[in-house]
Image (tube, helix red, strand yellow):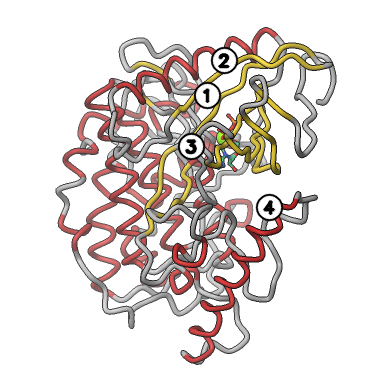
Amino acid sequence: SYRKGGYHAVRIGDPFAGGRYIAQRKLGWGQFSTVWLAYDTQSSKYVALKIQKSAQQFAQAALHEIEVLSSIADGDPSNSKCVVRLIDHFKHTGPNGQHLCMVLEFLGDSLLRLIRFNRYKGIELNKVREICKCILMGLDYLHRELGIIHTDLKPENILLFSTIDPTKDPIRSGLTPTLERPEGGTLNGGSTMNIIEKKLKRRARRAVANISVRRASMGGGGEAPKSARCLDGIDVRCKVVDFGNACWADKPFAEEIQTRQYRAPEVVLRSGYSCSVDMWSFACTAFELATGDMMFAPKSGQGFSDDEDHLALMMELLGKMPRKIAIGGARSKDYFDRHGDLKRIRRLKFWPLDRLLVEKYKFSESDAREFAEFLCPLLDFSPEKRPTAQQCLQHPWLNLRSSGQNEMQGQSNVDVGMRNLQI
Ligand code: ADP
Ligand code: MG
């Protein structure tokens, strides 16, 4: 991809925007861009520099993203609404062409990394609540105040940050630019670092050492650290990022939106969509945080497609889809008969959410019931019945406290999604 029309190759120390920004290290990448930690010599702060591929269609997508990000920034002068902030944008010409660049506030690791860091065992419910509140505040702002649908909400696109700037004070923030295991392995993999970066790392390692000492005295043993503990006592927040696919609610343009596992049924069925698709993805994300597993991981099999498996998985967890909804989409005829039954997957193995949480994920009865009561309305097959982000913020589950004794005990070996075996 590092050719004409593709990514721009960056070396550490490279200057951008006439020398204002200096590249420090790679933070991540997506289909359209690479994202770099850069030092802003004007504000003396670290920023994230998103450098788009140069070809025409990528430039167009970046212009759209800049437009969306600009209205997000304009509507939130105090930068308190849990959505990433655009600081600046410019063009950069390199050997592969002209690249649009976005300068964003520098945030921490993604929730996906947090889930991995926790070895897919799920995060303590009290932390899940805090993270959910932030995501909902972000969604409420986007939906109600701006009329923007994100359309690609998922753990990867939600980044942690500490209210204490980790680049200024990694020790107090406890949250370094990357989550590190006390054993010393970075989840980011090794990359060449310049002097500033090495200094940052050294300070960060000290912070991690403090945390691991605390863990040891709690009898943590040699097992993977619980990030909930690593994040203990830190006011951890998160922000929604990646507006490359976002759209205005009054002019949705793409038919197929969302990453497969977080895709709402009305998108699968092509029945039209609105802001409530983000609420569906939000529920999938909250489940994944709490259990470490994706809520729906559809796969195609003998005689059925991944779309059909997806619909079957939804119904196994949430009950049968009302006939009117099942047959109401442009794609409905491909999957459902006129009675509203799936054509090719005839036997469904129902496993309601609260039972799944108890039986597979070893939640206590009360934790399971309360969490399911929070999630199920968001997963209503009828999009207009789903609570809005604003309504969801009022839900009592967000203000409950679990004792911590009811944390997951580890998963049983029961497996779902083995449709091929059922047939
Ligand atoms: P794409 O649109 O190409 O998917 P994203 O905006 O999702 O690009 O960014 C790609 C990756 O870069 C993210 O998954 C994340 O790891 C990293 N990243 C993006 N924005 C930031 C930021 N503001 N601070 C820190 N890392 C970021
Ligand atoms: Mg992305």
Q: Is 68 left, or right, of 411 in this rendering?
A: left
Q: Say whether mark 4 is within 8 Å of ligand 1.
A: no
Q: Quadrant of ligand 2?
A: top right
- Residue that numbered label 2 is attached to: 61
Give the SS element for disc 4. Answer: helix
Q: Earlier in the sequence, mark 3 or mark 2?
A: 2
Query: Residue 197: which disc?
Result: 4
Q: Is residue 153 above or below residue 285?
A: above
- Residue that numbered label 3 is attached to: 105
Q: In this view, does 329 lie above or below 169?
A: above
Instruction: Kindly check if marks 2 and 1 are in contact, taking CB atoms under 8 A apart as contact.
Output: yes
Using the rendered view, name the quadrant where residue 209 is placed: bottom right
Amino acid type shown at disc 1: Gly
Q: Distance between the residues labelled 1 and 4?
A: 29 Å
Q: In this view, does 17 lie above or below 138?
A: above
Q: Is residue 340 above or below residue 167?
A: above
Q: Earlier in the sequence, mark 1 or mark 4?
A: 4
Q: Earlier in the sequence, mark 4 or mark 2?
A: 2
- Which residue lies at the image location 69% right of the left edge and 36% below the top edge? 23
Q: How far apart are marks 4 and 2 (CA)?
A: 31 Å
- Residue that numbered label 1 is attached to: 244
Measured from the top left, where is residue 33 in percent x and y?
Answer: 66, 28
